[in-house]
Image (cartoon, rainbow, N blue to C red):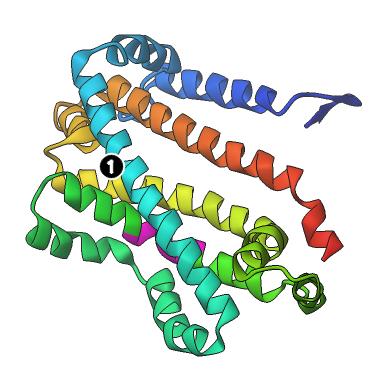
């Protein structure tokens, strides 16, 4: 963003949006959008409360467990699909089906099978995030230069060393891209799951605030979720930029 030849930091665009938000709220053009200053006040009131801490703990617990399972299964499946053509042909169709399907429709079935508690939220995060991790890992593994593997074998590298020191490092750019996208989708999954359950976690607070038309609190909670998702995505993107030289060296 530039102004009269001066390059402004990207954060300055947020100030413009916040100013517009404040004006729209003050003019009461949209009843569901309060002034931004009221949202900030609600933010300071909501975050320290016991209800928010309990809801955030439940949500974070479901998110972390679900993402850990997604990393383990997605990366393992992606490596197997990339290294073994038979597994890639067998599982590739199913992974692409689940990746392109509206998974929100699966959540009610999970609720019927697992109930209205933590297991449903964990599985929802897993289902939303694992497929993109597997696909990106597969792409990264398939793009590994065969000469690198042959070189490792010629120097007597074991299967474990080939995977950890050659295949994984060469596939790291795509693997990190899959992890970043998986984190974003996992965040969507945990919020969608809790919104449909609406009795635990952040979903309960969203339901409570919207039902009682507490819009400043509603928007404050939404900003918290957006900020967490952005920071998690940017943290992985930082490591993506650090290892981007692997893509060119392949």
Residue 102 spot, x, y in % from top left: 34, 67
What crowding class fits label 1: few (fewer than 14 Cα within 10 Å), some (14-19), or many (20 or more)? many
> For the stretch drawn in magenta, what is the main secondary structure?
helix
Residue 234 spot, x, y in % from top left: 60, 38
Q: Residue at x 32, y 13 (%)?
A: 42
- Relative horizontal placement of residue 12, taking residue 55 as reference (left or right): right
Residue 241 appearing in the image? yes
Q: Tell which residue pokes out farthest to the front in this image.
A: 156
178, 229: nearer the viewer: 178
Residue 142 spot, x, y in % from top left: 66, 76
Q: Is residue 33 above or below residue 203?
A: above
Q: Is residue 117 above or below residue 201?
A: below
Q: Is residue 250 above or below residue 58?
A: below
Residue 132 appearing in the image? no
Q: Quadrant of the N terminus?
A: top right
Q: Quadrant of residue 3?
A: top right
Q: Residue at x 55, y 41 (%)?
A: 233
- Relative horizontal placement of residue 26, taking residue 245 as reference (left or right): left
Residue 211 spot, x, y in % from top left: 14, 32
Q: Quadrant of residue 60?
A: top left
- Disc 1 target residue: 62
- Relative horizontal placement of residue 133, taking residue 244 as reference (left or right): left
Under circle 1, the secondary element is: helix
Q: Residue at x 23, y 48 (%)?
A: 121
64, 128: nearer the viewer: 64
238, 35: nearer the viewer: 238
Q: Is residue 4 above or below residue 37?
A: below
Q: Quadrant of residue 39?
A: top left
Residue 16 shown in magenta: no
Q: Residue at x 46, y 24 (%)?
A: 24
Q: Quadrant of the C terminus?
A: bottom right
Range of residues picked out in magenta? 127-133
């Amino acid at each position: 963003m530039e102004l009269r030849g001066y390059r402004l930091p990207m954060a300055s665009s947020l100030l413009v949006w916040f100013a517009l938000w404040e004006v729209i709220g003050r003019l009461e053009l949209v009843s569901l959008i309060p002034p931004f200053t009221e949202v900030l006040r609600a933010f300071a009131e909501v975050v320290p409360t016991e209800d928010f801490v309990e809801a955030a703990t439940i949500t974070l617990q479901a998110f972390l467990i679900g993402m850990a399972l997604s990393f383990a299964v997605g990366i393992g499946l992606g490596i197997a699909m990339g290294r073994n053509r038979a597994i890639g042909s067998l599982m590739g169709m199913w992974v692409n089906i689940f990746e392109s399907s509206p998974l929100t429709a699966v959540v009610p079935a999970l609720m019927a099978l697992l109930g209205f508690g933590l297991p449903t939220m964990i599985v929802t995060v897993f289902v939303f995030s694992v497929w993109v991790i597997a696909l990106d890992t597969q792409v990264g593994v398939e793009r590994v230069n065969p000469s690198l593997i042959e070189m490792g074998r010629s120097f007597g590298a074991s299967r474990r060393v080939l995977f950890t020191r050659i295949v994984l490092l060469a596939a790291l750019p795509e693997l990190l891209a899959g992890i970043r996208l998986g984190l974003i989708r996992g965040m969507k999954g945990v919020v969608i799951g809790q919104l449909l359950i609406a009795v635990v976690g952040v979903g309960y607070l969203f339901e409570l605030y919207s039902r009682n038309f507490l819009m400043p609190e509603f928007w404050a909670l939404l900003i918290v979720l957006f900020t967490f998702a952005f920071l998690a995505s940017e943290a992985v993107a930082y490591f993506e930029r650090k290892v981007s030289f692997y893509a060119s060296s392949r």
